[in-house]
C-alpha cells in the first residue's frame, strides 16, 4: 500500500477506537481486561491514571524500562489516550515535561480530556505524524513509544526524526511488534491487519538495523515476548482477518504467532 493510504487507514481505525466506549486491543494483543498487566503494567500504575487513558493498545511498558529522572523532557511517539505520558509525568515531576504526539485528532481529544481530569500540568499533546515530529531539534532527553512505529509506512523516517529531536546522549526506549518470519502477502495487503499492527511490522533484524542506520548506538534488545495464544485468537481484529481470509483459528495463531513484542533501547551519541 502507498504511504498516504496506510496513514488514512490507521487514522480512521484509531479514530474509531478513540470514540468507542470500550476499546478492544489492537496490535494483536486481544481484548482481555488484564492484557495491560500481561504486557508489563502494574495494577498500581493502571490505577494511578485516568481510566480512559488505558485503551489496551500497547504491547509493552516502555516507561518501566526508560529509567526516567526528575526534570527530564520525554516525547511519546503515538501517545493515544495518554497512558504512557501520564506515567512518565509522575517520574519526571513538575520540573520535567512530557510531550505526546499523535496524528489522530480523536485520540488527542481523549488524551487532553484525560490530562485535564488528572490535572497533569507537565503534559502536552501535539497533533502530528511521527515521521514529521512537531518538535524542535535536540529537545528531548528520552523518547518512548508503545506499539506504534510498526504502523508507520516509513520507519526509517521515524527513527531519523527521533534521532533529530533527541539531545546528544538522549535515550530511545520503545516497545513494538516485529516479525520472526515473513507473513503471507494476503495479510500484508489486508486493511484489518494494518489496524492490528501485523501487516506493518518489520522482521526483527531489519527493525534493529533501521535504528542503527538512523545513527543510534548501543542498540539493545531488552526483552522479547510472545503474546498469549488466547489473546491472539480472541482479538476482534484477528477474528476479522480470519474471516476475510478464510483461515482457521489454528492457522491464524500460527500466522500471528510470528509476531512478537520487542523492547529496544538505544542512545544518540554525544557527537
Image (cartoon, helix red, strand yellow):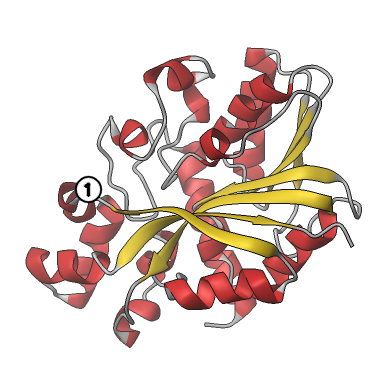
- Label 1 Cα crowd, 10 Å radius (few <14 / some 14-19 / many 20+): some
- Residue ID at (53%, 19%): 50
67 shown above or below 215: above
Instruction: Answer left or right for 205 relative to 153.
Output: left
- Residue ID at (36%, 75%): 190
88 shown above or below 178: above
Name the one closer to the observer, 219 or 93: 219
Q: Is residue 154 visible?
A: no
Task: Give SS at disc 1.
Answer: helix
Q: Can residue 63 be seen in this view?
A: yes
164 shown above or below 125: below
Give the number of callouts. Answer: 1
Task: Return the x and y of residue 90 as percentages of the image width and height.
Answer: 65, 20
- Residue ID at (63%, 46%): 144
Instruction: Answer left or right for 214 relative to 241.
Output: right
7 shown above or below 267: below
Instruction: Answer left or right for 184 relative to 103.
Output: left
Task: Return the x and y of residue 31 as percentages of the image width and height.
Answer: 28, 41
Q: Point out the residue furthest to the bottom here.
A: 185
Task: Return the x and y of residue 171 as percentages of the image width and height.
Answer: 71, 49
Task: Return the x and y of residue 10 as percentages of the image width and height.
Answer: 53, 61
Picture quarter containing residue 122?
A: top right
Residue denoted by label 1? 231
Q: Which quarter of the image is occupied by the C terminus?
A: bottom right
Amino acid at each position: 500500500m502507498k504511504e498516504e493510504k496506510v496513514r488514512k487507514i490507521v487514522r480512521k481505525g484509531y479514530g474509531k477506537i478513540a470514540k468507542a466506549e470500550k476499546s478492544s486491543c489492537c496490535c494483536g494483543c486481544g481484548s482481555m481486561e488484564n492484557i495491560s498487566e500481561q504486557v508489563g503494567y502494574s495494577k498500581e500504575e493502571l490505577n494511578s491514571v485516568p481510566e480512559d487513558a488505558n485503551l489496551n493498545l500497547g504491547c509493552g511498558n516502555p516507561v518501566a524500562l526508560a529509567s526516567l529522572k526528575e526534570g527530564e523532557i520525554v516525547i511519546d511517539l503515538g501517545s493515544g489516550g495518554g497512558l504512557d505520558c501520564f506515567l512518565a509525568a509522575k517520574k519526571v515531576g513538575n520540573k520535567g515535561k512530557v510531550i505526546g504526539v499523535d496524528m489522530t485528532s480523536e485520540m488527542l481529544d481523549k488524551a487532553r480530556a484525560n490530562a485535564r481530569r488528572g490535572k497533569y500540568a507537565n503534559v502536552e499533546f501535539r497533533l502530528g505524524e511521527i515521521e514529521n515530529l512537531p518538535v524542535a531539534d535536540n529537545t528531548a532527553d528520552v523518547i518512548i513509544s508503545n506499539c506504534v512505529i510498526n504502523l508507520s509506512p516509513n520507519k526509517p523516517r521515524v527513527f531519523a526524526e527521533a534521532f533529530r529531536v533527541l539531545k546528544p546522549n538522549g535515550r530511545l526506549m520503545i516497545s513494538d511488534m516485529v516479525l520472526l518470519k515473513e507473513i503471507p502477502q494476503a495479510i500484508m495487503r489486508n486493511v484489518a491487519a494494518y489496524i492490528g499492527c501485523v501487516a506493518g511490522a518489520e522482521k526483527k533484524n531489519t527493525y534493529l538495523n533501521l535504528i542503527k542506520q538512523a545513527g543510534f548506538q548501543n542498540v539493545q534488545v531488552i526483552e522479547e515476548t510472545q503474546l498469549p495464544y488466547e489473546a491472539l485468537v480472541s482479538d476482534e481484529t484477528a477474528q476479522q482477518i480470519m474471516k476475510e481470509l478464510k483461515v482457521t483459528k489454528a492457522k491464524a495463531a500460527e500466522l500471528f504467532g510470528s509476531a512478537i513484542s520487542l523492547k529496544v533501547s538505544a542512545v544518540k551519541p554525544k557527537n
